[in-house]
């Protein structure tokens, strides 16, 4: 049974579920940020839990490809450090990008953080009384390139609400 589940949830399937799974949430955040449905979906722990579980599973598969705990016990601890080569330089990061599993982990990481950021922007805009139509472009930018969308939103917030505090 476990093998069947693992075969069904191939890396491609996980990629497709993650990509398609966040789109309805983004549409709700962009088009109807203060609706009851949006608030229920974005203010619960289910979606972050699923994303964290997926991320954790993929990270475990990256570090311990066999997935077996006896492999964990027998494995040389220094082998695990190879997964952290990305901090040694761009060439090392690029070598990790040849690994499909690593790229998927990276992508899930990006999707989860950009979704969190989009939710924060939408909630903050409501709190600051910023019109949802003004926030649409920063939210779309956040979906595609998180930090750029955040920067644009904070700039607009400074202009419109004339508030810029890092401790909110």
Image: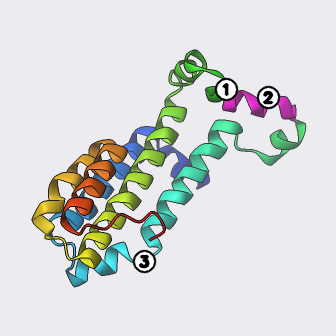
Q: Please identify the residue farthest to the bottom as the structure is shown.
A: 36
Q: What residue is drawn where x is 10% and y is 64%?
A: 133
Q: 86 or 102: which is nearer to us?
A: 86
Q: Quadrant for residue 73, please give it.
A: top right
- Dominant secondary structure of the magenta stretch? helix
Q: How is the image coloured?
A: rainbow
User: In x, y percent, where is residue 153?
Assistant: 26, 56
Marks 1 and 3 in Cβ contact (< 8 Å): no
Q: Earlier in the sequence, mark 2 or mark 1?
A: 2
Q: Local crowd at mark 2 within 10 Å, few (<14), some, or many (≥20)?
A: few
Q: 131 or 146: which is nearer to us?
A: 131
User: In x, y percent, where is residue 67?
Assistant: 70, 43
Q: What residue is drawn where x is 20% and y is 77%?
A: 129
Above or below residue 62? Residue 2 is below
Marks 2 and 1 in Cβ contact (< 8 Å): no
Magenta region, residue range: 75-84
Q: Which residue is mark 2?
A: 79
Q: Which residue is mark 1?
A: 85
Left or right of 89? Residue 111 is left
Residue at disc 1, secondary structure? helix
Above or below residue 74? Residue 91 is above
- Residue 156 disc label: none
Marks 2 and 3 in Cβ contact (< 8 Å): no
- Please tell me whether mark 2 or mark 1 is closer to you in this view: 1
Residue at disc 2, secondary structure? helix
Q: Which residue is mark 3?
A: 44
Above or below residue 80? Residue 6 is below
User: In x, y percent, where is residue 3?
Assistant: 59, 48
Residue at disc 3, secondary structure? loop
Q: Earlier in the sequence, mark 1 or mark 3?
A: 3
């Amino acid at each position: 049974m476990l093998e069947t589940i693992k075969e069904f949830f191939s890396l491609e399937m996980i990629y497709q579920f993650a990509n398609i799974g966040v789109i309805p949430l983004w549409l709700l955040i962009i088009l109807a940020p203060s609706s009851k449905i949006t608030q229920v979906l974005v203010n619960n722990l289910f979606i972050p839990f699923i994303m964290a579980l997926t991320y954790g599973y993929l990270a475990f598969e990256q570090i311990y490809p066999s997935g077996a705990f006896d492999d964990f016990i027998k494995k040389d601890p220094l082998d695990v450090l190879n997964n952290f080569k990305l901090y040694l330089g761009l060439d090392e990061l690029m070598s990790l990008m040849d690994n499909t599993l690593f790229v998927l982990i990276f992508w899930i990481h990006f999707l989860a953080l950009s979704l969190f950021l989009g939710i924060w922007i939408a909630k903050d805009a409501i709190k600051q009384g910023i019109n949802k139509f003004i926030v649409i472009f920063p939210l779309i930018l956040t979906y595609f390139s998180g930090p750029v969308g955040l920067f644009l939103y904070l700039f607009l917030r400074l202009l419109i609400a004339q508030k810029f505090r890092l401790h909110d």
